[in-house]
Amino acid sequence: MIHEQRRKRDGKRIREMRLDEEIEEMFAAAFAKGMLDLEGQLTPILVSLVSKDSSMLDGLDTASIEMEAAKVCPMT
């Protein structure tokens, strides 16, 4: 019973986080559209804001070391 409640609560949090991210993404696209005086739908603008560079994954081999260091000495 407790596990079911936790799963439902966690599922709700994940849905809420996804919704928040979608709202932020659409806001960023709308902001860019307004600032750059672009015309048309927000979807193509949103797609253009997403990084498609494969080099963004290059640092993953040291990420766990950096995460552990941050846990030991968090930034203040």
Image: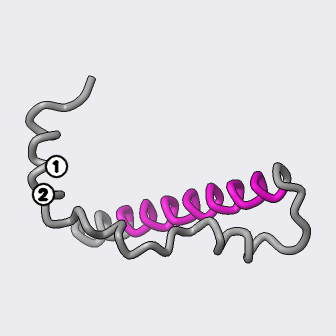
Element class at badge 1: helix
Is disc 1 in contact with disc 2, using a CB cutoff of under 8 Å? Answer: yes
| Highlighted range, magenta | 9-33
Q: Is residue 28 above or below residue 56?
A: above
Asked if the stretch drawn in magenta spans residue 25, the answer is yes
Left or right of 50, for residue 46: right
Rounded to the nearest angstrom, the CA distance separating label 1 from label 2 is 5 Å
Q: Which mark is residue 37?
A: none
Q: Residue at x 36, y 66 (%)?
A: 56
Q: Is residue 54 above or below residue 66?
A: below
Which of the pair 19/1 is nearer the observer?
19
The colouring scheme, among rainbow, by chain, secondary structure or one colour, is one colour
Left or right of 50, for residue 2: left
Q: Residue 7 lies in what quarter of the image?
A: bottom left
Other-residue count near label 1 (Cα within 10 Å), few / some / many at <14 / 14–19 / ≥20: few
Which amino acid type is shown beneath numbered disc 1? Met
Q: Position of residue 8 (x, y in %)?
A: 37, 69
Element class at badge 2: helix
Q: How many dots with numbers?
A: 2
Q: Which residue is mark 1?
A: 67
Q: Main secondary structure of the magenta part?
A: helix
Asked if the stretch drawn in magenta spans residue 68, the answer is no
Which of the pair 18/29 is nearer the observer?
29
Q: Position of residue 53 (x, y in %)?
A: 44, 72
Q: Which residue is mark 2?
A: 64
Q: Position of residue 69 (x, y in %)?
A: 10, 41
Which amino acid type is shown beneath numbered disc 2? Ser
Left or right of 28, for residue 21: left
Other-residue count near label 2 (Cα within 10 Å), few / some / many at <14 / 14–19 / ≥20: few
Q: Residue at x 84, y 74 (%)?
A: 41
* Quadrant (top left, top right, bottom left, bottom right) of the C terminus: top left
